[in-house]
Amino acid sequence: MNTVGTVLKGLFSNRDKAQKPAPERPVYIIGDVHGRYDLLLQLFETIDEDIARSKIDRLNIVLLGDYIDRGQFSRQVLHLLHKAHLQAPASFICLKGNHEQMLLDFLSDPRPETALWLRYGGEQTLTSFGIPIPDDLYDSDILRDMARALIKALGEDLCIWLHNLPLMWSSGNLTCVHAAADPVVAIADQDEDVLLWGCKTFLSQPRTDAVWIAHGHTIFETAHINQHRIALDTGAYKTGKLSAARIMSDGKVSFFKTAT
């Protein structure tokens, strides 16, 4: 029979666990890359050194989306991540960001409305695949030709991979998303637009279910923790700072960033 002391110890242990992010195994989470292949390679090297130094065996790596646009090397980033995921599909996880969704929306329905993607960094993505930027983004024939050229440049495997990118990943009391999770909605019931584009109350209203949310999308000067949120977008494409967090099963969080 449990003593009062044993019961209290269990209660406090559960409370402490809820106050810390506790994935089932160590996880490295990487913020928005936005075409900065150079920074991604640098950060992977830092993570690799940390894994060796810390002697971590079983782990996960999660990227939070927005691999393309704005930076100059979207093609290289996509090929690198696609290859890494194929080599370790269960432990190397790439989430879908709103920029990947904008690309997919354009490819599936090329018209002036979806071509607005080009004004949000899509031009750099086209350039990285060797596709010229048209002068007229209101000509339907030109847009269809451009979409066909990009589909061909991406290749079938990469197009399928982009389409099938998950919107979230969870382990223990930690959930990773691209943009946000509605604080008053259960994780399993989150709306796709919220996960990709954000939620007005996400950064101001704390959750009540003890779930920790790691996210990108919103740029901060530094990666940080605030009220069960772990923010990891530090504007790599313009700041030169690509950030990551290592979260251990015991709740210890460490941050890494590329040198500027």
Image (spheres, rainbow, N blue to C red):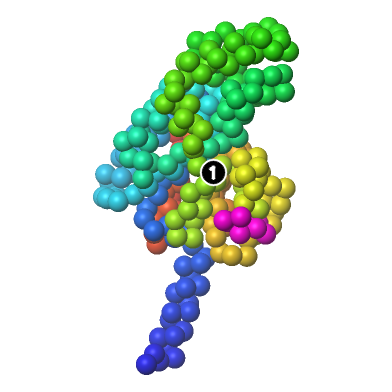
Q: Nearer the viewer, residue 15 or 94?
A: 94
Residue 171 placement (x, y as % from top left): 44, 56
Residue 13 part of the magenta-drawn span:
no
192 up-or-down from 136: above or below: below
The answer to whether any part of residue 59 appears in the image is: yes
| Residue drawn at x 45%, y 38% as measured from the top left | 94
Q: Residues within 10 Å of mark 1 (few under 14, many from 20)?
A: many
The answer to whether any part of residue 240 appears in the image is: no
104 up-or-down from 15: above or below: above
Q: Nearer the viewer, residue 7 or 195?
A: 195
| Residue drawn at x 48%, y 49% as measured from the top left | 169
Residue 43 placement (x, y as % from top left): 40, 34
Q: Nearer the viewer, residue 17 or 63?
A: 63
Q: Which residue is mark 1?
A: 167
Residue 197 placement (x, y as % from top left): 65, 40
Q: Which residues are magenta?
A: 183-189
In the image: residue 166, left or right of residue 208: left
Secondary structure, mark 1, is loop
Total labels: the figure holds 1
**Residue 76 sits in quarter:** top left
Residue 132 placement (x, y as % from top left): 57, 8
| Residue drawn at x 47%, y 73% as measured from the top left | 14
Task: Please identify the quadrant where the N terminus is shown.
Answer: bottom left
Q: Nearer the viewer, residue 217 or 122?
A: 122
28 up-or-down from 174: above or below: above
| Residue drawn at x 65%, y 20% as measured from the top left | 110
Q: Amino acid at mark 1?
A: Leu
